[in-house]
Amino acid sequence: MKYLTLVRHASAVHDSSYRDIERPLREKGLGKVKFIAEQCNERGYRPDLLVSSPAARAFETAALYAEESGCGITRDSILLDENLYMPSPGDILDCARGLDNAFSDVFIFSHNNGISWAAQEFCGDRSILMPTGSVVRIQFNIDLWRDVIFGQGRKVDFLP
């Protein structure tokens, strides 16, 4: 059994003095990450790997999640995947398929529209729309990450 939790980065500043990839989280976004960590902890979600887009707002969401959740993952051990910045659903699928099988509970921090579309494709559920700071937890009845395919995931939880 493998669990993939998709997290759309929390709310970021919309300031034209930043390049898009450099936009940091807003105060509201910081509070949302703390809420996400609390909710995931209450549900017993304990990731063994965090993978993030290199964009500041996604990485900051992942790093703050790691700190607030107490999951034991350090900021320095968060994997960065360039393909998670403004991804297609296929980019997220490729990321999942490339994961080390030693990990069974992985959180991916990325961006819309790709992350919402990927969640829809994984679960076969077009109603999934992910606002900033939302989480979709998906269960796959597989042993190897390379066997992840669209349509075979089961949505376990959604935190809007």
Image (spheres, rainbow, N blue to C red):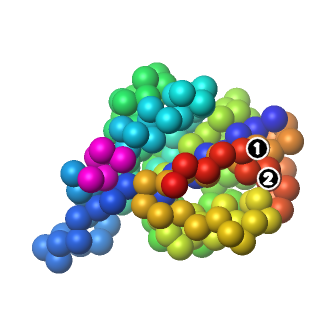
Q: Answer with the quarter of the image where residue 14 lies.
A: bottom left
Label of residue 43 in the image: none
The kind of residue on which mark 2 rests is Gly
Label of residue 153 in the image: 2
Extreme residue toward the bottom, this view: 16
Stretch of the chain drawn in magenta: 28-32
The kind of residue on which mark 1 rests is Gln
Task: Return the residue nearer the eye: 77 or 37.
Answer: 37
Image coords of residue 50 (percent x, y): 51, 40
Q: Secondary structure at mark 1?
A: strand
Image coords of residue 38 (percent x, y): 44, 32
Image coords of residue 109 (percent x, y): 49, 52
Residue occupying the point 79% across, 65% down: 124
Image coords of residue 34 (percent x, y): 36, 38
- Kindly identify which residue carries mark 1: 139
Instruction: Decide if residue 154 is on the left or right side of residue 4.
Output: right
**Marks 2/1: CA–CA distance:** 6 Å
Does residue 57 appear anywhere in the picture?
no
Residues at discs 2 and 1 in contact (Cβ within 8 Å) = yes
Q: Secondary structure at mark 2?
A: loop
Residue occupying the point 51% across, 55% down: 160
Label located before the other in sequence (2 or 1): 1
How many dots with numbers? 2
